[in-house]
Amino acid sequence: MKAAVYFGPQDIRCTTIPDSMLRADHEVLVKVTATSICGSDLHLYRGALDGIMEKGKSQTGHEL
């Protein structure tokens, strides 16, 4: 699957990560066909959370 991964300020890349696994009967997988960004994404992109983001592992995005 694809994910927007944080590598540092102004360095967010679309990368391939392992597919998610269902761990409980009440969980579902959703195929996202469109997404967007919002103002909080821009703060992240500009490095506002750089000190707490795990570079190369932290995935971004919450707008579906």
Image (cartoon, rainbow, N blue to C red):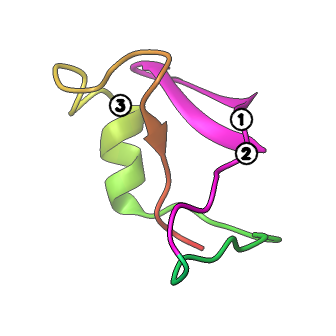
Q: Is residue 56 magenta?
A: no
Res. 55 image quadrant: top left
Q: Position of residue 35 (x, y in %)?
A: 67, 67
Residue designated by label 3: 46
Which residue is farthest bottom?
26
Q: Nearer the viewer, residue 20 or 9?
A: 20
Q: Nearer the viewer, residue 3 or 10?
A: 3
> Alpha carbon of mark 2 to alpha carbon of mark 3: how far?
28 Å
| First reached walking from the N terminus: tag 2 or tag 3 | 2
Q: Is residue 33 left or right of residue 29?
A: right
> Alpha carbon of mark 2 to alpha carbon of mark 1: how far?
4 Å
**Crowd rating for badge 2 (residues with CA inside 10 Å; few <14, some 14–19, many 20+):** few
| First reached walking from the N terminus: tag 1 or tag 3 | 1
Q: Position of residue 1 (x, y in %)?
A: 78, 44
Q: Is residue 7 magenta?
A: yes
Q: Position of residue 2 (x, y in %)?
A: 75, 42
| Residue 52 versus residue 55 in the image, above or below | below
Residue designated by label 1: 18
What is the secondary structure assignment of the residue under circle 2? loop
For the residues bearing labels 2 and 3, Cβ distance under 8 angstroms: no
**Crowd rating for badge 1 (residues with CA inside 10 Å; few <14, some 14–19, many 20+):** few
What is the secondary structure assignment of the residue under circle 1? loop
For the residues bearing labels 2 and 1, Cβ distance under 8 angstroms: yes
The residue positioned 75% from the left and 69% from the top of the image is 32
